[in-house]
Image (cartoon, rainbow, N blue to C red):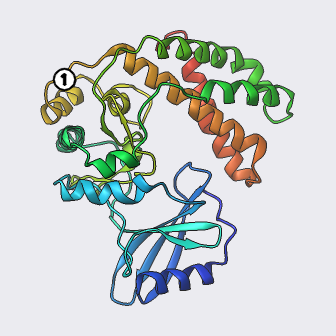
Amino acid sequence: MIDKPDVDERLLAAEVAAAWAVDLTSLTFMPVGLDGHAWAYRVETSEGGRYFLKLRHGEFGRAATRLPGFLRAQGVRQVVAPIDLPDGGSSHGFGAYHLLLYPFHDGGSRWGRGLTDRQWTEYGEFLGRLHAVAPSADIAADLPNETYRSNAGERLRLLGGQAAASEALAAFWARYGAALHRLSETVEQLAGHVPPGRHVICHADIHPGNLIADGDGPLHVVDWDAPILAPRERDLMFVYSQDFGDHPINAHRAALFGAGYGPYEVDRTTLSYYRGERHLDDAAAFLDGILNSPASPESRANDLHWLTRIAETVADPSYAV
């Protein structure tokens, strides 16, 4: 979120210092991410330590707190896992919120700058290793299984009625509403034609915005909030579509990625389902943020920017799922 949360930052700083037993010297809000229920801070300590603090309204899922550490123990070194509390566990309650503390990695996300050639290959290596890890019984119990029963289309239809009647979005909906409704129908049809496939551990949001790197340095993979057991296409959609990041895949980058990932024939129906469903889900989330949240004008303008970007993509005659 780009808006600060409604918390007393002095109390938050004291809570972090006590919970993780660190001598905190600064707590700096970071206006990053598009999740309307999560916020980020940079934490610095007197010993020179630097950390990334994630604050979420409500609780983190068990998979978000347990899977990253499990994956690192399996040798998936790119995973950024939360730091354990001295008394065990990793999530700490703070009023209506919960906290996770992570190592801080320099460089920022690769959304705007793109991946280097070496990093495209590492991207493939990372996903190849992730998809090869067999979950333990307790980790598997933490992870939801893909069912292809998305509620994104229904949410879009409900919010579309609000948008058409609103001053802020009436013109937008008149221009793009029909295209979004068509996509909803298409996604529902695709859900019934996805072939059965083996489910693997998927990050489920593995776009370049969740890849952190300094220059041509190693990749660090963040935001493990919603992993799932699903076909590989759940993650590969972010790689092979042109929708995520300012420097998407091309033939050269596909070859580099494939060299790291290894041979695999992508199922186009499954890939199309995930691309369309993600567009619907994001569009519904941004509509809700504009229509129903107490966000600042700046935050609503940011939501409208991303909503319009999705709608323009979907309404383009060349768009195909």
Decide if residue 301 is on the left or right side of residue 82. right
Q: Which amino acid does label 1 sit on?
A: Tyr
Above/below status of 239 relative to 14: above
x and y percent of residue 157 in the render?
Answer: 72, 24
Query: Does residue 172 appear anywhere in the picture?
Result: no
Q: Which of 252 and 123 is in front in this view?
A: 123
Above/below status of 235 relative to 320: below
Instruction: Tally the numbered discs.
Output: 1
Q: Which residue is drawn at 43% across and 34% down?
A: 244
**To which quarter of the image does residue 302 belong?**
top right
Crowd band around label 1 with a 10 angstrom C-alpha radius: few (<14), some (14–19), many (20+): few
Decide if residue 75 is on the left or right side of residue 147. left
**To which quarter of the image does residue 273 belong?**
top left
**To which quarter of the image does residue 130 belong?**
top left
Q: Which of 66 and 251 is in front in this view?
A: 66
Decide if residue 287 is on the left or right side of residue 10. right
Q: Residue at x 12, y 32 (%)?
A: 259
Q: Residue at x 55, y 67 (%)?
A: 98
x and y percent of residue 66 in the render?
Answer: 35, 58
Query: Does residue 267 appear anywhere in the picture?
Result: yes
x and y percent of residue 203 in the render?
Answer: 36, 43
Q: Which residue is drawn at 48% across and 17% down?
A: 191
Above/below status of 311 relative to 23: above
Above/below status of 215 relative to 100: above
Identify the secondary structure beneath mark 1: loop
* Residue bearing the label numbered 1: 264
x and y percent of residue 224 in the render?
Answer: 40, 51
- Where is the N terminus found, in terms of image quarters? bottom right
